[in-house]
Image (cartoon, helix red, strand yellow):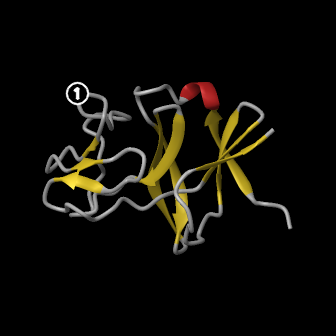
Amino acid sequence: MATQKRLICALEDVVEGGDGVRFEVLRNGERVPAFAIRYAGQVRGFVNRCAHVPVELDWLTGKFFDLTGHYVICAVHGAHYNPRSGRCELGPCKGASLVPVPLLECGGQLFVVGEDVAPREIGVSRQE
């Protein structure tokens, strides 16, 4: 069975430690905001919603990283999330995690896959 995928952007648009790429993903029949970032060479996707209070994380459109470039930060409470796992390491929701969005790198493009399906694994698949 072929994997259903939807184009988000060109891979080159997801810059190491730079602005995230915002998009929407279907969850439980509803379109919700999501984002893709690149950290330590890996592209990761998450629903754009703090694990503490349901607010979007970016402090300006696409600005997800703190000033060090090592954490995804919630603009409302300052919760710091590990960009590899989405787990909150500092802040009011310490130990909670962002909801991962499965992504696929293929042919220089980035796709969202498995919409409206609970993801089993955080991260990106690669197809050559």
**Amino acid on which the number 1 mark rests in the picture:** Leu
Report how many numbered discs are placed on residues in the image: 1
Q: In the image, is residue 52 above or below residue 16?
A: below
The image position of residue 58, as x and y in percent, is: 30, 41
Q: Residue furthest bottom?
A: 28
The residue at which mark 1 appears reads as 67
Q: Residue furthest right?
A: 1
The image position of residue 55, as x and y in percent, is: 26, 56
- Binning the other alpha carbons within 10 Å of mark 1 as few (below 14), some (14 to 19) or many (20 upward) gives few
Kindly identify the residue that appears in the image at 43 percent across and 35 percent down: 20
The image position of residue 63, as x and y in percent, is: 33, 33
**Quarter holding the N terminus?**
bottom right
**Quarter holding the C terminus?**
top right
For the residue pair 89 and 109, the one nearer the viewer reads as 89
What secondary structure is marked by label 1?
loop
Quarter of the image holding residue 29? Answer: bottom right
Kindly identify the residue that appears in the image at 52 percent across and 75 percent down: 28
- Please give left or right for residue 93 compared with residue 119 in the image: left
Kindly identify the residue that appears in the image at 24 percent across and 27 percent down: 68
Q: In the image, is residue 111 above or below residue 47?
A: above
- Please give left or right for residue 57 compared with residue 62 in the image: left
- Please give left or right for residue 3 compared with residue 93 in the image: right
The image position of residue 51, as x and y in percent, is: 28, 62
